[in-house]
């Protein structure tokens, strides 16, 4: 939250307003910094311009300026940023997968394909043979049907979490691949990358 200092005529005296202490001073008003905020792009700088009173609310206006002096500077910077974002996207996905899988030892994960296959088969026909799930259920003191329910719930949860990570990774990868340095109309894709 940002505040502005106002005088007794409700005019802005200082923005942003900073003070010592925890309590908000009486001459401070909350400023809406979002409603007029333009979208940020990689090649523009965004600055505070002024605060104005609109319908009893204080609203921040912004000004936008070019970040680079020449087209060559812009292209060189974009090339660097795309390379960095590509590396961050790869590392982020790998780390997310490691985080997801860190909950279970590799030895247990090795059984997942068989567990999934048996659970799906049992779910379609509960008379099918389920050697692994039968042993797991017996060891846990539950029925095969209960074991199948647990496996299917875990598969669904894993697919959701993994799918979100993979989908974001793939989305970013496609966007980064669509940026062509020689074609300025493709540069907007870089602004859509979420890494």
Image: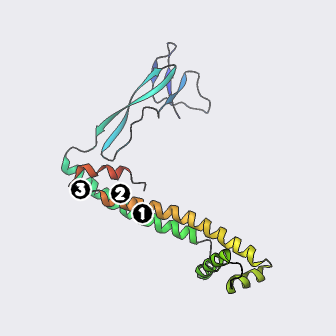
* Separation of residues labelled 2 and 3 (CA atoms): 13 Å
Q: Earlier in the sequence, mark 2 or mark 3?
A: 2
Image quarter (top left, top right, bottom left or bottom right) of the C terminus: bottom left
Q: Is residue 30 above or below residue 192?
A: above
Q: Earlier in the sequence, mark 1 or mark 3?
A: 1
**For residue 103, side relative to residue 178 (left or right):** right
Q: Is residue 168 above or below residue 46?
A: below
Residue 33 horizontal/vertical position (percent): 47, 33
* Separation of residues labelled 1 and 3 (CA atoms): 21 Å
Q: Earlier in the sequence, mark 1 or mark 2?
A: 1
Counting other residues with Cα less than 10 Å from the Cα at mark 3, is it few (<14), some (14-19), or many (20 or more)? some
Give the colouring mode of the picture: rainbow
Where does label 2 land, which residue?
175
Give residue 130's quadrant in the image: bottom right
For image coordinates 36% across by 62% down, the residue present is 86
Q: Is residue 160 above or below residue 5?
A: below
- Label 2 sits on a secondary structure element that is helix
Residue 21 horizontal/vertical position (percent): 60, 32
Give residue 68's quadrant in the image: top left
- Label 3 sits on a secondary structure element that is loop
1 vs 3, front mark? 1
Residue 91 horizontal/vertical position (percent): 43, 66
Residue 187 horizontal/vertical position (percent): 29, 51
**For residue 49, side relative to residue 20 (left or right):** left
Q: Which mark is residue 170?
A: 1
Counting other residues with Cα less than 10 Å from the Cα at mark 2, is it few (<14), some (14-19), or many (20 or more)? many
For image coordinates 62% across by 30% down, the residue present is 23
Front residue of this view, candidates 138 and 172: 138
2 vs 3, front mark? 2
Where does label 3 land, which residue?
181
Front residue of this view, candidates 151 and 74: 151
């Amino acid at each position: 939250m940002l505040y502005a200092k106002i005088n007794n005529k409700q005019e802005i005296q200082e923005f942003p307003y900073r003070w010592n202490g925890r309590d908000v001073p009486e001459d401070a008003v909350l400023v809406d910094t979002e409603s007029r905020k333009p979208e940020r792009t990689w090649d523009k700088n965004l600055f505070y311009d002024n605060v104005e009173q609109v319908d009893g609310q204080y609203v921040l206006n912004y000004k936008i300026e070019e970040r680079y002096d020449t087209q060559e500077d812009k292209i060189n910077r974009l090339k660097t940023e795309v390379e960095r974002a590509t590396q961050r996207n790869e590392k982020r996905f790998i780390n997310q997968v490691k985080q997801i899988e860190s909950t279970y030892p590799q030895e247990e994960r090795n059984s997942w394909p068989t567990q999934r296959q048996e659970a799906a088969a049992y779910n379609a026909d509960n008379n099918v043979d389920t050697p692994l799930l039968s042993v797991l259920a017996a060891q846990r003191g539950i029925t095969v049907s209960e074991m199948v329910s647990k496996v299917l719930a875990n598969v669904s949860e894993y697919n959701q979490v993994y799918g979100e990570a993979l989908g974001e990774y793939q989305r970013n990868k496609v966007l980064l691949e669509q940026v062509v340095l020689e074609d300025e109309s493709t540069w907007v894709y870089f602004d859509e990358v979420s890494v």
